[in-house]
Image (cartoon, rainbow, N blue to C red):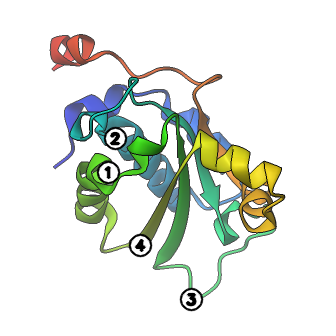
Amino acid sequence: MTTPHLNNVYAREVVMARVGHLIRRKQREIERITRILRGLFDPSQVQAPEPGRIKRIILIGPYARRSWYEDSRTIEFSDYEFWVVVNHPVFTDERCWRRARATIDREVGNRCAVDIEVYSKSDIRTARAERDTFILDRIEAGITLYRASRDAPLPSHDQREERS
């Protein structure tokens, strides 16, 4: 079962084009996971000084490499790593991500393993200031699947209700 409002997030072709080097099934899985992360991020689970926003979703690891190729080990099962950057450290709290993680496990858990790391903008600024190559190299080598400054915003809660 899929959550209806997750289908209204953005044109799926946008994310799939960013991972066009992968086979179609993996493109669809990555697009679906990205849609779930955006649609089910729940900042209301924590008290915060500002509204919660996802700033970026990045695919990290072997599937982000343009030189990636399908082999007998990866044809049936995928192991994805997503990094999510949020606007405030309080939104890195696990409670904000429970629904998204549960939905990902339910919808794609039998076909792939999904690791989600959540960082705040200030974490990334600190990494840059400290020249933290672990974080910076992965961000540089990763594929940005969603960036708030360039991609379509989510419909407001009221707009989602109207479409349901």
Question: Label 2 is placed on what type of residue?
Answer: Phe
Q: Residue furthest bottom?
A: 73
- Report the side of 127 relative to 25 (left or right): right
- Report the side of 131 relative to 18 (left or right): right
Q: Earlier in the sequence, mark 2 or mark 3?
A: 2
How many angstroms separate mark 1 from mark 2 (CA)? 6 Å
Q: Earlier in the sequence, mark 1 or mark 2?
A: 2
Q: Nearer the viewer, mark 1 or mark 4?
A: 1
Tell me the residue that label 4 is attached to.
Answer: 112
Which corner quadrant holds the C terminus? top left
How many angstroms separate mark 4 from mark 2 (CA)? 20 Å
Tell me the residue that label 2 is attached to.
Answer: 41
Question: Label 3 is placed on what type of residue?
Answer: Arg
Which residue sits at x=48%, y=52%?
Answer: 28
Instruction: Choose top left, top right, bottom left or bottom right for residue 131.
Output: bottom right
Pointers 3 and 1 in contact (C-beta within 8 Å): no
The numbered mark at residue 73 is 3
How many angstroms separate mark 4 from mark 3 (CA)? 12 Å
Q: Earlier in the sequence, mark 4 or mark 2?
A: 2
